[in-house]
Image (spheres, rainbow, N blue to C red):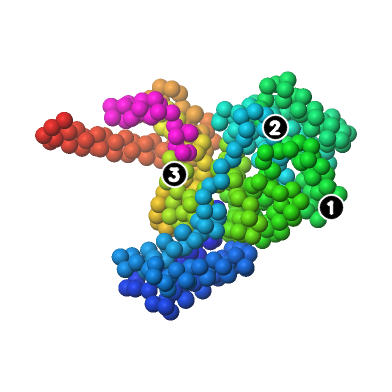
Amino acid sequence: MFTSLTEKFDRVFASIRSRGKLSENDVRETVREVRKALLEADVNFRVVKDFVAKIEARLVGDEVHKSFTPEQQIIRVVNEELTQLLGGTVVPFHLRQSTSVVMVVGLQGSGKTTFSAKLAAALRKRGRKPLLVGLDVYRPAAMDQLEVLGKQIAIPVSRGKAGETDVKALWERGQDAARDKLCDTLILDTAGRLHVDAEMMDELVRLRDVAKPEEILLVVDSMTGQEAVNVATAFHDRLQLTGVVLSKLDGDARGGAALSVRSVVGVPIKFASMGEKLSDLEPFYPERMAGRILGMGDVLSLIEKTQEAIDLDEAKDLERKMRSQQFDLSDFLGELRRVKKMGGIEDILKMIPGMSRALPAGAAVDPKQMTRVEAIICSMTPEERAKPQSIDGSRRKRIARGSGTTVQDVNQLLKQFEQMKKMMKTMGRMQKMGRKRLPFR
């Protein structure tokens, strides 16, 4: 996410890292490089013009603090202005306590159906009882896709039969289904359409007037760059959008859509779709996103991901096992799966402040390696996982065959696990020595 833009900003900051203070020439040069980085990221040129003008005015004005290094001054100003460009503060997603309607719109292929399912799963965590209503009567198998996604997350789906084209009738059937199933949130998955197709846009307007949704969310493919601005503008002119959703943000290396839509259209970004899993949906926090773009990390999102993936009682039990040297390969497998639930390893590392700079350019953690480790441990017996030292040569061959790996892979895993246990044992001894030296406890 925003890899290209982050790398360009990092080069800009590095170029003034060794300066003693900022001169006006330094500021002009830095602003020029920031402008270039944003334009290459496919950010709208008017947005870029206003953005760099604000940065330059602040850096040559009275706001430059002598206590900051030149790099800190630049990062502070760019971070604050970037946060404002993305919306400043998070705009809450509010629904009525009674039955509410969310209308999901967008171009075909933007990810509306998948987002509808992600939103339903997220709202259920907040205590809502959502119903997915299939209203895409044009795309073949669209309602089948919605029904499959609904089954995956155990959310009810109201859909039409093959050949039905009356969107208003399908909406009314969705209302009846919501009453029967005691659902309090109807999520309308509408058909994708071109923003220049007047007839299909009129159909959306009629549906809006009938359904009276609290939220009208436009799903925008973040990889479309500046075209996302034209799409959002056209939809907002006809429907008065309440929010924008950036889909496929995990695959967007440039960031043009995210940095342009809010400023040009004036509609807040409310959600960011960060991956293919139905749990990969985040509220859009401008300050956190600015931190990620500038390589400053996102500690709050990391904490939230950790809290969702790790149970407190399980964490305490794991700590006890590690202290008493009872941590085995079954425990290691459990931790590996929890990390995978949190998302891509690279994205997790980049949430740690400074880590994006510490990682080499283009560095990546091979997910296949984690899969191999998981396969090796799963090919062991419970006894072998509890006592890795019992795994002799013949057992290593059997484990390698069972996991589709090599004996060398098995040897490497066992060696690394043994080294980790030794390190934990050393840390445990150091903690005990420290406690003994404490005068009071």
What is the magenta segment's predominant secondary structure? helix
Taking depth in this image into account, of 139 and 179 the one nearest to the observer is 179
Crowding around mark 3 (Cα neighbors within 10 Å: few <14, some 14 to 19, many 20+) is few
- Mark 3 in CB contact with mark 1 (< 8 angstroms): no
**Residue type of the residue flagged with mark 1:** Ala
Q: Please name the residue that numbered disc 1 is placed on.
A: 198
Element under disc 1: helix
Between circles 3 and 1, the one closer to the viewer is: 1
Name the image quarter holding residue 51.
bottom right
Q: Please name the residue that numbered disc 3 is placed on.
A: 300
Find residue 242 and report its horizontal and vertical position in percent.
66, 46
Q: Which residue ends up furthest to the top in the rendered image?
A: 180
Q: Which residues are magenta?
A: 304-329
Q: Please name the residue that numbered disc 2 is placed on.
A: 186
Dot placed on the residue nearer the N-terminal end, 1 or 2: 2
Q: CA distance from mark 2 to mark 3?
A: 30 Å
Find residue 160 and report its horizontal and vertical position in percent.
82, 30
